[in-house]
Image: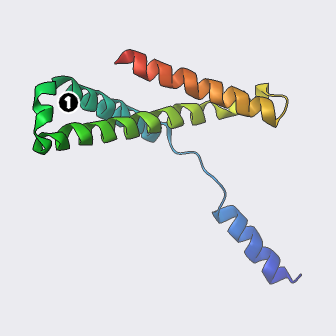
């Protein structure tokens, strides 16, 4: 392998290495996701079942449900991912890591649903 190819590979490896975003960006993203889930929940709470007879009234609650589920899912993923290093250190093998990750995700989802 020539020196130029090795340099190029090293540059590519350095450019494509994962980086951690600044803490304020993560905090802002989490706050935005929390606000979206709360707004979607408020929209669904305000919706009256009697309005369901007219299909024209289905757009807002359907959009609120999609936004709420999407933001809630992203919030769970963000929080579970933030604790990944700790779980990885505590796990003895890959199977245990997967089990701990699923348990953490389920617990976080329960916390978000319980707040509603």
62 on left or right of 2: left
User: Can you see residue 48?
Assistant: no
Return the x and y of residue 83 as percentages of the image width and height: 62, 30
Asked where in the image residue 38 lies, by quadrant, the reply is: top left
Of 65 and 73, nearer the camera is 65
The quadrant of the rendering that contains the N terminus is: bottom right
Residue 14 in the image: above or below residue 67 = below
Q: How is the image coloured?
A: rainbow
Asked where in the image residue 61 lies, by quadrant, the reply is: top left
Of 63 and 51, nearer the camera is 51
Residue 72 in the image: above or below residue 115 = below
Return the x and y of residue 6 as percentages of the image width and height: 82, 75
Q: Residue at x 77, y 75 (%)?
A: 7
69 on left or right of 107: left
Return the x and y of residue 108 as percentages of the image width and height: 52, 24
Q: Secondary structure at mark 1?
A: helix
> How many numbered circles does the render carry?
1
In the rendered image, the residue lying farthest to the top is 114
In the rendered image, the residue lying farthest to the front is 53
The quadrant of the rendering that contains the C terminus is: top left
Asked where in the image residue 95 lies, by quadrant, the reply is: top right
Q: Residue at x 66, y 34 (%)?
A: 84
Q: Residue at x 10, y 31 (%)?
A: 51
Residue, disc 1: 43
């Amino acid at each position: 392998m020539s020196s130029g190819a090795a340099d190029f590979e090293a540059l590519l490896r350095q450019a494509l290495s994962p980086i951690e975003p600044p803490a304020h960006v993560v905090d802002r993203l989490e706050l935005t996701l929390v606000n979206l889930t709360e707004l979607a929940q408020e929209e669904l709470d305000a919706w009256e079942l009697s309005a369901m007879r007219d299909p024209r009234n289905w757009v807002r609650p359907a959009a609120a449900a999609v936004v709420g589920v999407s933001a809630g899912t992203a919030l769970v993923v963000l929080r579970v991912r933030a604790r990944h290093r700790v779980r990885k250190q505590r796990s003895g093998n890959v199977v245990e890591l997967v089990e701990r990750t699923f348990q953490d995700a389920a617990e976080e989802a329960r916390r978000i649903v319980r707040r509603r």
